[in-house]
Image: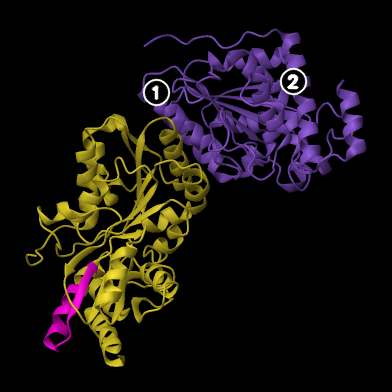
Amino acid sequence: MSAPSAGGASRDGYGKALLRLSEDPRVVVLEADLGKSTKSCLFRAEFPERTVSLGIAEQNMMLVAAGMASSGKVPFASTFAIFTERAFEQVRNGISRPGLAVHICGSHGGIHTGTDGSSAQSIEDLAIYRTIPGLTVITPCDDLSAEELTVQLLDHGNASYTRTARNKTPRMYDSETVNNLKIGKGSVLREGSDVAIVACGVMVCEAIEAAKMLEGEGVSASVIDMHTIKPLDTNLLDDIRAECDGIVTAEDHSIIGGLGSAVAEYLSTTGGYPIQMVGVKDRFGESGESSDLMHHMGLTRNEIAAKARNIVNSV
Amino acid sequence: MEGRAEGMDMSIPELEELANVCRKHIVKMIHKAGAGHPGGSLSAIDIIAGLYGTRLRFNVDDPDWEDRDRFVMSKGHASPAVYSILREMGFLNDDDLSTFRALGSVCQGHVDMKWTDGVDFSAGSLGMGLSFGLGCALAARMDSSERETWVMVGDGEVQEGQIWEALMAADFHDVSGLKLIVDRNRIQNDDFVNVQMEVGDVASKIESFGWNVKEINGHDMEEIVGALEWASSAGSGPSAIIAHTVKGKGVSFMEDNPSFHGKAPNDEELALALEELS
């Protein structure tokens, strides 16, 4: 594929997707005061009559969305990832349990959020939402893939949670390659035979850079954009197991419960396989410039490469 | 857009008889299951009978009819009240009621739209139903439909903060199609409401949130029917009926008795209850 180019933040892709979805009159957008941040404001500007402002009241927003879904609408409800967690039980009991196709977007996910500090840096959202039966969990890596995957939610049928990032990341896709994406299917960005780096969200870019570093050392690393955490693309994991010595997972999320755990659960219950995880090591974040903070927390290409070396050197 | 079709037009004596039949279903169902919530079912059933017998438009042959009125039973533990009325309206039969709370039953412990035809909401966690009803009412308005959304909550339930989020939002969005009924039976799980967390003058509080509000005796069928009509025609904005009720109404030893919030009658108590209701 072509070299990554500078793009927008994945939240920008979400906002653009809502505009593309607006052609369907069933689509409604719900906000909890953070439309300018999540980028649902783009939809509001064009379609105020189909945008519902619920104020700073996330629990109410989740159930209003559920009620609208039960009445034939396709609701997209967004706020910061961390504040969706405030309404976790509403998502569980009010949306997923009755099987209502509400699409939740949590922006500003992860340590990458940066200077706002630990209160805004959701590092457990993927874990908690992954436990809810029937809920699709998505973390796109750039603006183009966020746009494409959000558009695919229109007739997805199940409730979903999509985490987007506040800050810009290099594009991993272009206007053509992005069309190959499919919810629930991991995307192979780079082929390799020694180790596979399975990453999601803003760590996909870091994974690509780590693979380049490893290449210089004679280690062949493949890179997977595992944008859908649930349902997990287990066929792809089977392929990796057949081809590589082990897996490094990389996510801007706690190492407890997220992508690494999802991969480990599958591999460990189907025969075992070397796996190393890069993620937030069971601690909260703090304030700092995004890049400084990511480095401080070990969310880097160096960390990924080090884990890969561990696997390669141990076989 | 076509105008609102009429609901059923039962008379006051017919509604009173309907509620009494439902009361018998309620105590039998809970006795059979050996678990359930008789108190809040019996306090709510007169209002529910009035609602189904005069206002709600639904189609037993097409439970998912998109233009039906919605009944959102937010106090979902009072499910026997809902199942009993659905039995009388033809959605359920006696066999269904006899399986209440059993494995695989369409009569789940708490009302659940995924399991039961005629149920519009999956309840069980208090404080969520008014928000859900607001979503239903907003969707109806977007569809230029006159379908109404009726939500019932308990008075203990209004201790949940989400109720007040929804009250504020319904006024802000001026949602006239949303109707709230508060079953003010003064008892919650552990004890009387004024012991646990007094909610006080609920009518004034909700009125101060911009709603049209009316207080009634929730066991006087004339008042119930009148209030339901009032709520349907109260004009601009959402409307709330505060129904003052007696927990366990109709069975003397359950009335105003916190211990029958969530306890099944034993054989002897069932016989006594049915005798009083005959």
Q: Chain of mark 1?
A: B
Chain represented in yellow: A
Instruction: Say whether disc 2 or disc 1 marks the residue closer to the N-terminus.
Output: 2
One can see residue B200 in this view: no
Query: How dense is the environment of label 2, judged by Cα within 10 Å: few (below 14), some, or many (20 and up)?
Result: many
Q: Secondary structure at mark 2?
A: helix
Label 2 is placed on what type of residue?
A: Ala
**x, y percent for residue A71:** 42, 30
Chain represented in purple: B
Label 1 is placed on what type of residue?
A: Arg
Compared to B121, does A296 lie above or below? below
Compared to A40, does B17 lie above or below? above
Res. B19 mark: 2
Return the residue nearer the eye: A31 or A106.
Answer: A106
Q: Secondary structure at mark 1?
A: helix
Which stretch did the figure color magenta? Answer: A208-224
Residue at figure coordinates x 26%, y 79% from the top left: A295
Q: Chain of mark 2?
A: B
One can see residue B5 in this view: yes
* Quadrant assignment, res B85: top right
* Quadrant assignment, res A308: bottom left
Res. A174 mark: none
Check if residue B213 falls in the magenta segment.
no
Compared to B31, does B117 lie above or below? above
| Residue bearing the label numbered 1 | B141
User: The N terminus of chain A appears in which quarter of the rendering?
Assistant: bottom left
Return the residue nearer the eye: A82 or B53.
Answer: B53
